Amino acid sequence: MFGILKKKLKKAVEAVSKRFERKERIAKSVGKEVEERIEEVAEKPEKVEEVIEKIPEVKPVAEEIKEKIKEAVEEAERKPEEKKSIIKRAVERVVKRVVERRLTAADIEPVLNELVTDLIEADVALETAERIKEDLEKSLVGREIKRGKERELVIDALKQSLLSVLCVPQIELLSLEKKPAVLVFFGFNGSGKTTSIAKCAKWLIENGKSCVFAAADTFRAASIEQLGEHAKRLGVKLIKHKYGADPAAVVYDAVEHAKAKGIDYVLADTAGRVHTNKDLIDEMKKIVRVNKPDLRILVIDSLTGNDAVMQARMFDEIGVDAVIFTKVDVNEKGGAILSVTHELKKPILFLGIGQRYEDLERFDAEKFVEKLLQV
Ligand code: GDP
C-alpha cells in the first residue's frame, strides 16, 4: 500500500537530512579556520586570492568576497581607522552563508523541487505538492539543529505538513442527530460505490445500527440486482423502483420506509453514469433537493490518480460532505488522497482496503501519516 509515495517521501527525508549534515560538517571543519583567515584578509585585503585558495569551501562565493572587499576598501577610504572592521564585517556576511549550520532556502531549493516532481509522480496534484514544498521551506529554512537529529527534524516537518493537508474535522458517523440519517453515495461507475455501501451497512450493523438501502441507480442495467444481492446477504431491506424511474423518488420512499420502521440509516446508491456528466450532476442535485441528505458521500477509486481532483471538483458542484477512497489495498501511489482532501477540505470517512465486507477502515489522518513516514 502506497509503496511509491512512501519511497518518494523517504528520498526527500534523506536528501534534506544530507544537506543538513553537509552544512554541519563544513561549519565544524572549517569554521575556526575561516575565522582566522577573515582576520588575515581584513589585515591584508590584497592577499584575498591566496587566502581563498586555502579554503575550498568558500570558493563558490569567491567572486562575491572579492567584490565586497573592493567595496569595503573604498568605503574605508573615508574612515581609515575602521578599515579592518569594515572589511571583516563585509567578508563575514558572505562567508557566513557557506559555513553556517543553518539551512538557507538556496540549500534546499533543489531538493524540494525534486520532491515536487516526485510527489506528482505519486499522483499528488501540483497545487498540493507545492503546498507541501512551501510548508517544508517554512519549517526548515533558518533552522539550526543538533547533530544526529537531522532526520528527526525533517520527518517532523513533513509530518506536520501532511497532517495540515489531511486534518479536517472528522464526522462521527454513529452519532448523527437525525433519525433516519440519510447518506447518499455519489461516484463514477466502477469507483466501488455499491461495494462501499454494503461495507458501510455491515459496519453500521456491527455498531448496533439498522439500515435500509435505496436503489437509486435506476440507469445502469443490473445495478438494482447488485445492491439487492448485498441487501440479501446483509439482511437489509432494499427499496427499489423500476429502471428509468426517478432516483429522487426511490430515496424518498426509502426515507419514508425508515421513518415508519424506526430504521437508523438510509444508504442510497446512485447512478455513476447517465447520458452526460451534466445530466448526472443534475440528477444528483435533484436527489439532494428532494431528500436533503445528512451526508453526501463521494466514493473515489484511489487508483484514479490525478483525475481524482477533477472528479472531486465535478461532484463538489452538488456538495460533498465526506469521501471514501476505495482500492487502497492495491494502490502504490496514494497521492490522490492528499490532493482530494486538499481540494475539498472534507474528511475521509473510510478507506476501502479489499473486496470483502470487512475490508473497510475508518480513516485516521495521524495513523495514515505515521505509516507513510515509517522508514
Ligand atoms: P460501482 O460501479 O461504483 O458501484 O463499483 P462496485 O462497487 O461495483 O465495484 C467495482 C469493483 O471494484 C468491484 O469488482 C469491487 O469488488 C471492486 N472494489 C470495490 N472496493 C474495493 C476495494 O476497496 N479494494 C479492491 N481491491 N477492490 C474493490
Image: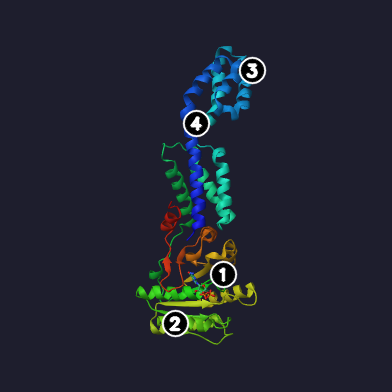
Q: Which residue is mark 3?
A: 74
Residue type at the position of mark 3? Glu
Q: Residue at x 38, y 70 (%)?
A: 174
- Are there few (<14), some (14-19), or many (20+) residues within 10 Å of tag 1? some
Foreground mark, 3 or 1, reads: 3
**Amino acid type assigned to the residue bearing label 2 in the image:** Ala
**Which SS class for mark 2?**
helix
Tag 1 residue: 318
Distance, label 2 to label 3, CA atoms, is 88 Å
Return the residue nearer the eye: 9 or 161: 9
Q: Which residue is mark 4?
A: 26
Nearest to N terminus: mark 4 or mark 3: 4
Measure the C-alpha gap from mark 4 to mark 3: 31 Å
Instruction: Point out residue 281 in the picture as x, y percentages from the top left corner.
Output: 60, 73
Residue lying at the far bottom of the rendered structure:
242
Compute the Cα span from label 4 to label 2.
67 Å
Q: Residues within 10 Å of mark 4 (few under 14, many from 20)?
A: some
Q: Is residue 335 visible?
A: yes
The 10 Å Cα crowd at callout 2, few under 14, some 14 to 19, many 20 or more, is many
